[in-house]
Amino acid sequence: MSARPSTGLAAAVALYEQLRRRPDPEATASQLHPGRLDPPTRWTPDLLALTPYASVDPATLELEGYPDFHAIPDQVLDAAIDQVVQTEGPVHFDVLADRLLNAAAVGRLGSRIRARIEARVEQRQTAWLAGPAQWHQPRYRDWREAPAATRQLDYVSDPELMLALFRAVLDGRGEDRDTVMNNGIHAIGFTRLTAAARARLEGPLEALIQGEYLVATGDTLRVAQTAL
Amino acid sequence: MATCAVVCVCSNWAMGLFKFGDKDQDGRQKRIEHTGRYLRASRTGGVALRAHVKAAGVNVTGNTSRGVRVSTRLAKNTQVALQNGRFVLRGRYGSDAAKLNLSKSGVSVSSKTGIGTLNWFRPGRSSAKFAGVQLRGQKAAAINGVYLAFAVTAWALRGMGQMLGWLGRGLGGALQWGVGEWQQARQARERLAFDEMAVAPVGQRILDKHDVHPPQEPIRDLFAALVCLTALFGRGHTDLDMARVEADAPGHPFAGPLAADVQVTSAQLQAWLAPVPEAEGPEAVLGLLHHIARGFADRVEDAVRTEAVFAIDEACLALGPRTILQDAMLDVLVDALNVELTLAGER
């Protein structure tokens, strides 16, 4: 059966990688590997292909028709917030506010409106809002597809930046820190590695190393055996 | 220097004059002679002046050594002539292999040979040319005879060589076929023969008992289970040596995760197989393989299924020569994955 040159287990590893990198929506049982489909409890890299950033359509938030923002009932505002987070999470608070104001046809984020929105999302620990799954396993998104005002590196959450850096190492787009940072953000749509961007990326990169997702040997980074 | 130049010019003139180096239509040296417009000089004919006119379809040729000749074309390839009052009839028909020659005295048959022409009825009318020297008569017949004898011998030897080649190839093919048949028969004796109908129900009973539905399991785990069942259980192992995976795919970030997935599925499969009666041993593991492979096949494209067969076969071989059980497993795998294998050279 083996007319080709023997590759040992390399062919199995290559095919396994191919299978890991494809979506598997029909997987609903986990008898072969108990716990496989449990939601992740720690940061987990998404291995699927880059997908366009999907932003919420303000018209679907149903915030129109109210005399002012404070007239919007709490449950309607909560539903709109949930929808924005579900669609765009991890989403920065400012982006969330922008989507709500657009949907309600309000021009400016005043302090009272900010306080109202903050009151509805008071449990958040960071500037970003996300469901647990979005936080632990963010999607690999192409920010070139995001609305112009949203397309800022400061609006990209730490877990998502970790993913961009991890994918740069995994996909072989660089080994040293600077190249990984540059190629990592370039892949998701940010073309310039400025000093500010470098400072922004230091934290997520360190988190990857501390979390044993990447191994740093000198300036060289590689994927840890337990990362996947 | 001037003498040398004169010698060279004379030499070239002589070469051109007597057709030295000129080739006939068969690529051989032309007859050594000079044929100018009015002058002909040859070894046997000597030097002769000649002139030729044609009027009303009649050729008139005057030659200082042959006299006057009047000739005309009677039909295609047929000529009648009067030469010094003597009637001449000449005809030559057919192919080079057997030409029919017509003359006053009757007909004869001649064949072109590599060296001249051999007249079969009147060997004295044969001709031969060797190095531009034209010979006729019995000498030519003898030379043609010798030439033909050599040609027939060479042809016979070549024919024998070809026959021996065909015979050799025929014998080689027969031998190869025989060895192939013998090997297949030997492998068939050594193979475990299980068909789908025999193993599928046993596998299904195990899956039902543990409420397992392969089509719903993650593809990565189905593949890990296929590797585990075939490469490990097929040779009586339960653990995949991580060092071996690392050695085959050094530094590959997915090498460790594959080994880890295989380990977890190995534990699960062992748990499912443990309570199975001994009597159902091979059928049980083959039955599980069948259903897991079917679940895998339903979710991936043709190319991936084919890659899976080769990858799993390579994984088996990476851990040692295939066992008899592994041969049977690969048969089940190929069937369940619906992969059509074409042997090298087969169309």
Image: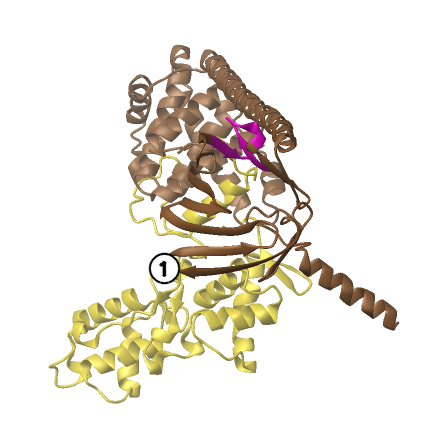
Q: Nearer the viewer, residue A75 or B4?
A: B4
Coloring scheme used: by chain
Chain letter matching colour yellow: A
Q: Quadrant of residue B140?
A: top right
Side of A65 where B181 appears, left or right: right
- The residue where tag 1 is placed is B56
**What tint does the image give chain B?**
brown
- Percent x, y for residue B261? 47, 39
Quarter of the image containing the N terminus of chain B? Answer: bottom right
Judge whether residue B122 is colored magenta: yes
Seen from the viewer's position, the closer of residues A129 and A185 is A185
Q: Name the residue: 38% across, 30% down.
A: B334
Residue B133 screen position, x and y as percent? 67, 44
Circle 1 marks a residue in which chain? B
Q: For residue B290, which quarter of the picture?
A: top left
Q: Position of residue A136 (x, y in %)?
A: 41, 58
Relative to residue B57, is residue A196 drawn left or right? right
The residue nearer to you, when weighing B277 against A39, is: B277
Magenta region, residue range:
B109-124
Q: Secondary structure at mark 1?
A: loop
Quarter occupied by the C terminus of chain B: top left
B93 relative to B251, above or below: above
Relative depth, front residue between B276 and B203: B203
Amino acid type for the residue under numbered disc 1:
Ala
Tell me where residue A175 sits by quadrant.
bottom right
